[in-house]
Image (cartoon, grey):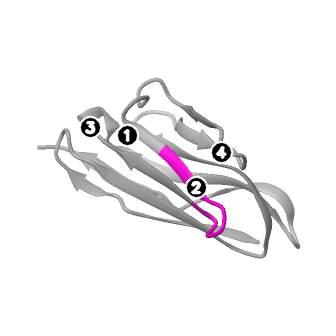
Amino acid sequence: QGQLVESGGGLVQPGGSLRLSCAASGSIFSIYAMGWYRQAPGKQRELVAVITSGGSTNYADSVKGRFTISRDNAKNTVLLQMNSLKPEDTAVYYCNARLKTYYSGTGDYWGQGTQVTVSS
């Protein structure tokens, strides 16, 4: 089994920055794509950014130029650096990863979510 644990959310003023971190653990054989999604109240969960095992990235149009996703394959972690935050970035942010584990095969895993609030 695999597990994702997020950290780094919080309250920040508009224009500020936050960095989210997500660590994968468990009986992991390999990690494929890792990414971040978010869900605002009353809205569907949406993709924010994704990074492949080779380092290719893709971003939602709403965060391009402000957010940067990166990963440390040696530490099984994915980071989301969020700059120039806007009130509309307020949401619960979820880490996602496609993992292959020794005992459960390949599947999509989710973190528990971390709240990001952008407000003055």
The residue beneath circle 1 is 41
The residue beneath circle 4 is 55
Relative height, residue 57 to residue 96 (above, below): above
Q: Position of residue 78 (x, y in %)?
A: 55, 57
Q: Earlier in the sequence, mark 4 or mark 2?
A: 4
Q: Are marks 2 and 3 in contact (CB under 8 Å)?
A: no
Is disc 1 placed on a helix, strand or loop? loop
Quadrant in the picture for residue 3: bottom right
Between tags 3 and 1, which lies in front? 3
Q: Earlier in the sequence, mark 2 or mark 3?
A: 2
Between tags 1 and 4, which lies in front? 4
**In the picture provided, is 99 more to the left or to the right than 78?**
right
- At label 1, the amino acid type is Pro
The residue beneath circle 3 is 84
Q: Earlier in the sequence, mark 4 or mark 3?
A: 4
Q: Please provide the residue range marked out in magenta.
A: 69-77
Q: CA distance from mark 4 to mark 3?
A: 23 Å
